[in-house]
């Protein structure tokens, strides 16, 4: 898992209020005939503000309803297309947490970003957001094209070159990744994020001493940024030091350690040391802290089964069912539990 600075998908397109003028149509032979219906009016700033509010409150369905209507009334507005995309991405995240396939909505979001870029092709922020959406559906080649477009439109942007470098890294295009990340660091020498990304590149190349030094340097630049610490843990684990990775990750504040990314990396390090029960407990704590995350409950349950603790696994079935009442995650975990009970070694 890559750890990036929080990326805002807020548009740089600032739509003005669109005022639709009502035109009275009168018959040429008389004024007693009723005027035809007036075109629908839309208050763009108010609609955008309502969508932003719903997104901040984590209510993508309400945001999508307004965004869809806004797009219907303003089909040539890049802002309307972008707001649709943002609502779809949040809805996809909620789908993933409930164990549903997030790809359909993420692909729809990518299409809406493509529409927005076509309507406002000079807006670097839209190309950047489109690249992130492409990354989310595994379209790395398209993401690279988008980040390159954003970087061309905004020569001073560190973020676009950082994202470009990480995309090349996922493609194992190491020289291109190095050039992009070096450019990002030159543009923002005080930012820890290019340094952390360079650590990931060094780890992929097997230069672990350099990778660890870079990752530690990034953490020292911004100790409160959990993503940097998680990446240090990942580099330590990759270098063959899972114990050190655990020490680094368990030192995070509880609210940071219980995030999915940190939990995943912590559990992987524990599994490298064959501490299956501890890995199960890490996922269990994450599931309890995020009661809507059925996947975290499933991860915990599977590891409890691997550790031989069926009672804890059964509790995770209940957690998954609360998070996803109509979904399949709890049923799949229950089936694994039932199969384990039929095993010859079951008590």
Image (cartoon, rainbow, N blue to C red):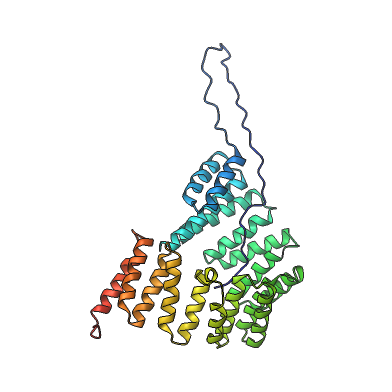
- Residue 267, image x and y in percent? 47, 78
Where 47 sits versus 115, above or below?
A: above
Q: Quadrant of the N terminus?
A: bottom right
Q: Quadrant of the C terminus?
A: bottom left
Q: State the count of labels.
A: 0
Where 161 sits versus 70, above or below?
A: below
Q: Is residue 44 visible?
A: yes
- Residue 114 sits in which quadrant? bottom right
Where 59 sits versus 315, above or below?
A: above
- Residue 93, image x and y in percent? 48, 60
- Residue 283, image x and y in percent? 44, 73
User: In the figure, is residue 347 to the left or right of 79?
Assistant: left
Look at 68% across and 65% down and name the residue there: 159
The one nearer the camera, 53 or 163, is 53
Q: Is residue 101 visible?
A: no
Where 166 sits versus 131, above or below?
A: below
Look at 66% across and 74% down and name the residue there: 177
- Residue 141, image x and y in percent? 59, 67
The one nearer the camera, 186 or 141, is 186
- Residue 295 sits in which quadrant? bottom left
Look at 62% across and 41% down and name the residue there: 45
- Residue 124 sits in which quadrant? bottom right
User: In the figure, is residue 139 to the left or right of 11?
Assistant: left
The one nearer the camera, 44 or 243, is 243
């Amino acid at each position: 898992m890559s750890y990036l600075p929080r990326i805002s998908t807020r548009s740089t397109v600032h739509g003005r209020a669109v005022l639709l003028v009502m035109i009275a149509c009168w018959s040429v032979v008389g004024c007693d005939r009723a005027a035809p219906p007036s075109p629908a009016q839309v208050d763009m700033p108010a609609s955008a503000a309502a969508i932003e509010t719903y997104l901040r409150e984590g209510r993508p369905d309400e945001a999508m309803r307004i965004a869809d209507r806004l797009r219907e009334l303003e089909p040539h507005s890049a802002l309307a297309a972008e707001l649709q995309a943002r609502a779809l991405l949040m809805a996809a995240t909620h789908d993933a947490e409930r164990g549903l396939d997030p790809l359909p909505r993420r692909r729809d979001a990518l299409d809406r970003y493509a529409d927005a870029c076509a309507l406002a092709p000079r807006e670097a922020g839209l190309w950047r957001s489109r690249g992130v959406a492409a990354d989310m559906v595994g379209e790395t080649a398209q993401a690279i094209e988008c980040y390159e477009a954003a970087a061309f439109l905004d020569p001073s942007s560190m973020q676009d070159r950082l994202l470009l470098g990480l995309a090349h890294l996922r493609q194992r295009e190491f020289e291109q990744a190095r050039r992009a990340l070096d450019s990002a660091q030159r543009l923002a020498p005080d930012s820890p994020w290019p340094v952390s990304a360079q650590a990931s590149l060094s780890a992929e190349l097997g230069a672990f001493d350099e990778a660890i030094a870079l990752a530690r340097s990034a953490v020292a630049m911004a100790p409160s940024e959990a993503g940097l610490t998680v990446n240090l843990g990942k580099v330590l684990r990759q270098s063959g030091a899972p114990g050190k990775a655990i020490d680094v990750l368990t030192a995070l504040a509880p609210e940071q350690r219980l995030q999915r990314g940190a939990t995943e990396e912590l559990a992987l390090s524990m599994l490298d040391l064959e501490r299956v029960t501890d890995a199960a407990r890490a996922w269990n704590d994450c599931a309890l802290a995020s009661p809507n995350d059925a996947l975290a409950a499933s991860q915990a349950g599977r590891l409890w089964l691997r550790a031989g603790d069926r009672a804890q696994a059964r509790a995770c079935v209940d957690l998954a069912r609360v998070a996803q009442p109509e979904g399949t995650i709890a049923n799949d975990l229950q089936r694994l539990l039932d199969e384990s009970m039929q095993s010859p070694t079951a008590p």
